[in-house]
Amino acid sequence: MKLISLNTWGGCLFESLITFIKDNAKNTDFFCFQEILHTPDSSMDVQTPNHHLFSEVTNILPDFTGFFAAAQDNYESITNGPSEATLGLAIFVKKKYVINDKGDFFINNQRNSFVPPDYATMPNNLSYIQLNIGGKHLTICNVYGAACPVNKLDSPDRILQSQKILNFVLSQPGEKIIAGDFNLLPNTKSIYMFEENGFHNLIKDFNIFTTRGSTIKKLKPELGTGEYGWQEFADYTFVSSGVKTIEFLVPDLPISDHLPMILEFKI
């Protein structure tokens, strides 16, 4: 089986992102997307396809069922002004799989808590699906973690965020995959907490040296001159001990300001 996790940057690099998803659809079972925008089809504007990213991806993945988990309505940061776009998470699952349960919950702040321009008020949620693979229970979690403080270091909210995730996954039977944009650097307690609870950190295990890549450096060179310089890490994939990793790749592709994490596995 194959799972791809990616922060889509709200579809800012729309054409290359869509091409990547199309190219990988045939041999992928699960897509976990963060920073995805969704607007009702009744207000579609062909000039702003990224505002309707969930619908656009749904249209190119006819063999998948998509689940959208809303976080912030009328999201203005990516759309640069008032809009009907809702920011959230999306999981797409090949239709051959039977979903036993799905849902989401907030790990930082609450639905529609964003008070611009204070990004510490942004809501952050986790969405999940649960299914049986060959009689074995599997929970897949899609995470978008708090972006503040921007140093990507530990804070009380981030420690609590990790604990909320762990409280959920440790209460579930079977195997677990936790993937997404955690907005954290590797040497933080917020990351160590997963390792201490028996999860394999594939970013560490496979010696991945960046999850941000070269595209953001080309498009936003000014970010490297800030107080914290280039922060090469944000995204992680954690797996429980019963998930056998066959291959784990983080290719440097110009599809977002983050890189895709591609996991081939079996349980």
Image (cartoon, rainbow, N blue to C red):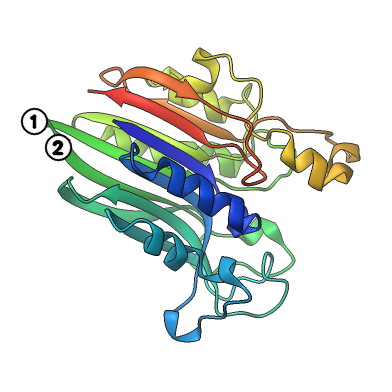
Q: As shown in the figure, which amino acid type bears the numbered disc 2? A: Asn
In the displayed structure image, the side of residue 12 where residue 25 appears, left or right? left
Residue 172 visible at all? no
The residue carrying pointer 2 sits among few (fewer than 14), some (14 to 19) or many (20 or more) residues within 10 Å by Cα, namely some
Q: Quadrant of residue 266?
A: top left
From the top left corner, tell me how far across and down residue 63 is, in percent: 27, 53
- Which residue sits furthest bottom? 42
Q: Residue at x 34, y 51 (%)?
A: 92
Q: Residue at x 44, y 25 (%)?
A: 194
In the displayed structure image, the side of residue 184 where residue 193 appears, left or right? left
The residue that label 1 is drawn on is 135
The span from disc 1 to disc 2 (Cα, nearest Å) is 6 Å
In the displayed structure image, the side of residue 21 where residue 173 appears, left or right? left
Q: Residue at x 30, y 58 (%)?
A: 62
From the top left corner, tell me how far across and down residue 153 is, in percent: 68, 33
In the displayed structure image, the side of residue 115 where residue 44 appears, left or right? left
Quarter of the picture holding the N terminus: top left
Q: As shown in the figure, which amino acid type bears the numbered disc 1? A: Gly
Q: Residue at x 11, y 29 (%)?
A: 134
Q: Is 216 situated above or below 135?
A: below
The residue that label 2 is drawn on is 132
From the top left corner, tell me how far across and down residue 160 is, in percent: 50, 41
Q: Is 266 situated above or below 24?
A: above
User: Tag on residue 188?
Assistant: none
The residue carrying pointer 1 sits among few (fewer than 14), some (14 to 19) or many (20 or more) residues within 10 Å by Cα, namely few
* SS assignment at label 2: strand
Q: Is 200 situated above or below 182?
A: above
Residue 91 visible at all? yes
Closer to the camera, 88 or 245?
A: 245
Q: Is 240 situated above or below 165?
A: above
Q: Are marks 1 and 2 in contact (CB under 8 Å)?
A: yes
From the top left corner, tell me how far across and down residue 75 is, in percent: 61, 71
